[in-house]
Every structure is written in structure tokens, then in C-alpha cells.
Image (cartoon, helix red, strand yellow):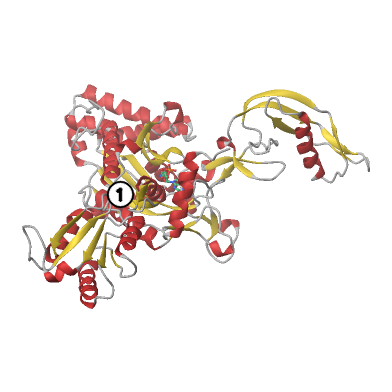
Amino acid sequence: MAEPKENVLMEKITSLCKRRGFIFQSSEIYGGIQGFWDYGPLGAELKRNVKELWWSTMTRMRDDVVGLEATIIMHPAIWRASGHVDTFSDPMCDCLLTKKRFRADQIEFQSGNAYHYAGAKDTATGKEVVEPYAVLLAAGKPPESARKTAAQFYAQRGLQTVELIGETVAKVENSQRFNPENGSLLTPPVPFNLMFKTYVGPTATEADVAYLRPETAQAIFAQFKNVHETSRQKVPFGVAQMGKAFRNEVTPRNYTFRSREFEQMEREFFIKPDEAVEAVTAAVATPAAKGHPGEPQPNWGWQLWHQYWVEERIKFYEGIGLPRTTLEEYWQKPEELAHYARACVDILFKFPFGTQELEGIAARSDFDLSQHERCSGKAMGIFDEELRTAFGKLPPQKQTELKDRYYAARLKYLTKMGVSAAEAGAAAQEDADGLAKGQYIPHVIEPSAGVDRLILALLANAFTEVTETDAKGKSETRVVLRFHPRVAPIKVAVLPLLKNKPELAAKARAIFESLRGHMMAFHDEAGSIGRRYARQDEAGTPFCVTVDFETFEGIKDGPQAGVKDTVTIRHRDDGKQERIATSELLPWLLVRVK
Ligand code: GAP
């Protein structure tokens, strides 16, 4: 059967990435290690550009976001409070025949006839193995192949001349209990915690267990008070962090898409609870329409802030070259949401292997800070003078209404976390009284993106094959990576037309030296100019600057005939060339690549 088209495309992308030094398998010389990837020279530049663009757009260019750089290993209590120790797991099962491991929820649904066996006997020795086993066959397949698979299973248990016992056949519809590759029964799913464990200190006992962070977000919550106190920010404001995260994925797959070590770019944007917004502004604004809601306003509640961040994040992706047509929004259904979440939107990208998540934007209520307050015993709330003043001026009926609503929300959270009814009631009452005095635990909107998935999306989006036919009718297909200049690993390549003309070579080198302090530039003298252009197209370099004879002798024809010290700029995507003065080159490039 022909390979699906999308896999052919992924193969082309992965082979280009290796050949041109974007991505290598980690530890390749020892056979590799599944779920770990290294970025080569071009990949490292691409990644650095993506992270810098995220950081500057989401942090430096905003008045209301500050940064954080926390450790990868943190106190294990953080992961107990966040719920990761108890619930950060995937269901896992193994093939009873081959021992191959699967994520139980990702197994494709299958239908057919299941051949069940009660056990088997060795006809030579009389030894019996009483262990149930089953094999699923697609309808119409001869039972012999099920029996052969079952015989292999029992042979692994020490039987040599296998006689199967108690064969029964049952129709199966949409089952995930069988290995899709060989029909063998799988073990029942068991939860598998995805956090990597390690030990802090030399004794390596259970008391020293710590975890490699599975997300960067929790450090932001844990450091919320320090950041709030030192940054002089007022709610609403955000804290951004990017860095490594680790998940012991059961089945890493789709190249770098699901890795065991990867990088995240996360931000917690802290907002007032809606009751506080209502107290201060009289009414919480509700979303009027889909799309970007415009500049943030004091009367925005969580819904508008959430919508705002969804749109801002899509704007970011468009700004680095992922057209909106390549993206989709998936609004999680109420039954898919975590119990504390108000809403969650996944931004999906149309990868060659399917439309999959690039980033999640969750409205997480005040769950995370509340958890850290309860588990650490340290107050995570803030005091808001504007709220205290406004609350005091509200009519008593409005005060009661807002306090009641806040009380109900806090009670719901505390009860859900298993706090006894009496304690939860008293604590919720204290919180509601606190609101009237200007105190609350901030709610949060969390846009959480993966660097590696974005790199893969950019590569897939940029990958283009161009077929050209020469004068003799010979066709050649080559790859052009159409990266947006802002993310392209190399921004400009400076090339002398001919290597063996010292004045051309020296001028090209001098231009390269003048540019490299401002952007990633590349200097290449080797090979024909056509081959050098092609090499740069494959690396995704948007502009090639060529130093030729007219640079010295003056432009030959046209209105600028005779003008010296000019170079040609060749555009990657259409091959068009234009000539500009060398002195204008740097500003010309800067406006296009930054
Ligand atoms: N703090 C929220 C959080 O971590 P998530 O949906 O589990 O949410 C956020 O992860 C983003 O991190 C994902 O949208 C994805 O881009 C990236 N990501 C998650 N697991 C990944 C993995 N195993 N490999 C690569 N990227 C991953």
C-alpha cells in the first residue's frame, strides 16, 4: 500500500532537518534515545529567534508583563499542591505478546472477532498454563492466524508443543483492548505518572525525591508574591517564563511534537475575580463579538481577558509567518475542562500528521494560587485599595450579593479539595469578608506554548519544493524554506560573485563584517553563485547580497548608470533581484528582519 502523503512530507522534513543541521537525534552515535532531540547550527538559531520574539512581544514590549527565570528542580511540595504528583498521568498498557508499550487512550478503535483462550497445554510434557489470552481478527480472516498468535503467547510461557484450551469467539465493536499491529490482547490500562523523578542530595532515599519540572508555570505561582512585591505591578499583570520542561511520555512521537524533554513559553496573567471588577466598575463587560476585543479595559472580567489572550496569541503566530488559515481554535467542551477551569482554548496547527495542539490558553480561576496558599500556609492573596474604597461605597444589597457570589465560588473550590464542610464554610466566609476589605486571590489566564512544536510548525509551513527546468529541458526539484524573515536562522548571506577576484572577495567580507553585529549573517565564497543561492534557499535565508563587478565599475545601464558601491539583493521566494547602495544595506535589512 502506498504511504500516506502526509508521512512522505514528514519524512522529507526530517531528512532535510538532519541534512541541513536543524535537528539531530539526541545521542545518535549510541543509537539515539527516544523522545530527545538536539538542535543543530541552523535549528539553534531558529529556536533562539522564536524564543526572543516571544519574550520581546509578550514581556519586554508590554507594560503589564514581567519575566521570571526559575529553577528546573523545585521543592516537591509544589508538585503535590499543583496536583501533578497525584494526577499527572497517562493510561498505559503493554502488548502481552511483544511487550510494546502504548498510551491506552491513543489506541485506534478496532472491530472484528476476538478469539479468547482459557489457557494452553504442552502435549509433550502435559504442562498446563492457565492464563486467559485473546487475539482480535478483522472480520473474514481465518481463525488459524489467531491460533498462531496465541500459540506464540503460550510458547513464551514455556510450552513447546502448544494445544490451546477453551477457544471461544466473540464479536467486538470499537475496542481499544487489542494491539492494532498484531491483534494481541493488551494489559489493562494503568496510570503512569509522567514526571521524571530524581534525588536531591547524596542519600537517594524516598525522602530526597524531587522532580524535573513537567511545566514552567508552577514556579510563577510559587514566586507570585515575590514578583508582585518587587515588580511594582498591580493586578491585572502577567509573569512570563520560558525554559525546559520534562515529561516521561509513554509514546513520544511525530518527531519533536511529543518529546520527553522540550521547552515551554508560558505566562500567567493575573486578573481580579469578577466580583472585584464588578465592585469597582459597577458591571463586568461581556464579550460583544468574536475576534479581538481591543485594548484592555478596567471592566473586563475573565471572559474578555481570555478572549483577548487567545487573539493576541493568534496575532503572534501570524506575525512570525503562520497564516491564520494554518491555525484552528478548539474550545474545550464543559465536560473536557478541569474542574477549576472556566474555559480552555487550544490553538491547533495543521501539521502534516494532523491538526494538533500548538498552545493552550486556559482560564484557570484562582485554583493554583489557592492551592499554594493552602499547602504552604503562606498567604497568596493581595490587597487592592481601589477595591476596598469602592466596596465601602456600594449599597448594602450589592455588597451582600457580591460577597455571596464570592463565598459560593470559594466554598466550591474548598469542598472540591476535600476540606470538611465546617472548615470550608468558615474559610469561604473569611474570604468573602476579605473581599469587602479589598483582599482576594487573583484569578489567572494562562497561555502556554511549546517551543519545539512551534519550531516544527514553522518548518512544516516553510517547507516548499520548487521544480525548475533548465535550457536543456532537465528538471530539478529543490527545497526552499519560506521562513518569515523574523524567524529565519540566517537573515542574510553575503556572496562575492566570483571567489577568485580578490577585490570582490574582500568587499563581500567587509560587508559581512559590517552586518554580523546586527543580525545572523553568513559569508559564502564556495561554488557557483547558483549553487550558493540554492544552499541558502534550503536554509531559509530570505536575502542574499551579491558583490559583483558593477559594485566597483558602476551600474551599467538604466537611470542609475555609473553609480558605484552598490550590491544586488536577491529575494528567496521569487528570485527577484534589486540593486541598492551598500550604505543603505543595513537599514534596508533591519526593517525586514527584526
Ligand atoms: N501549564 C500548562 C501546560 O503545561 P500543556 O497543554 O500540558 O499545558 C502546554 O502544555 C504546551 O506545551 C502544549 O501546547 C505544547 O505546545 C507543549 N508540550 C506539552 N507537552 C509536550 C511534549 N511532550 N513535547 C513537546 N511539547 C509539549
Is residue 378 something one can see in this rendering?
Answer: no
Give the quarter of the figure containing the C terminus.
bottom left
Residue nearer the viewer, 396 or 446:
446
The crowding category of the residue bearing disc 1, from other C-alpha atoms within 10 Å (few below 14, some 14 to 19, many at least 20), is many
> Quadrant of residue 492 in the image?
bottom left
Residue nearer the viewer, 354 or 394:
354
Residue at the outermost bottom position:
502
Circle 1: element type: strand
Percent x, y for residue 519?
A: 25, 63
Residue denoted by label 1: 239
Locate residue 246 relative to residue 182 in the image: left or right: left
At x 76%, y 24%, the residue is: 169
Is residue 318 something one can see in this rendering?
Answer: yes
Q: How many marks?
A: 1
Percent x, y for residue 427?
A: 39, 35
- In which of the image's four quarters is ligand 1 placed? top left
At x 28%, y 73%, the residue is: 499
Give the quarter of the figure containing the N terminus.
top right
At x 51%, y 38%, the residue is: 4
At x 26%, y 70%, the residue is: 498
Residue at the outermost right position:
125
Locate residue 441 relative to residue 112 in the image: left or right: left
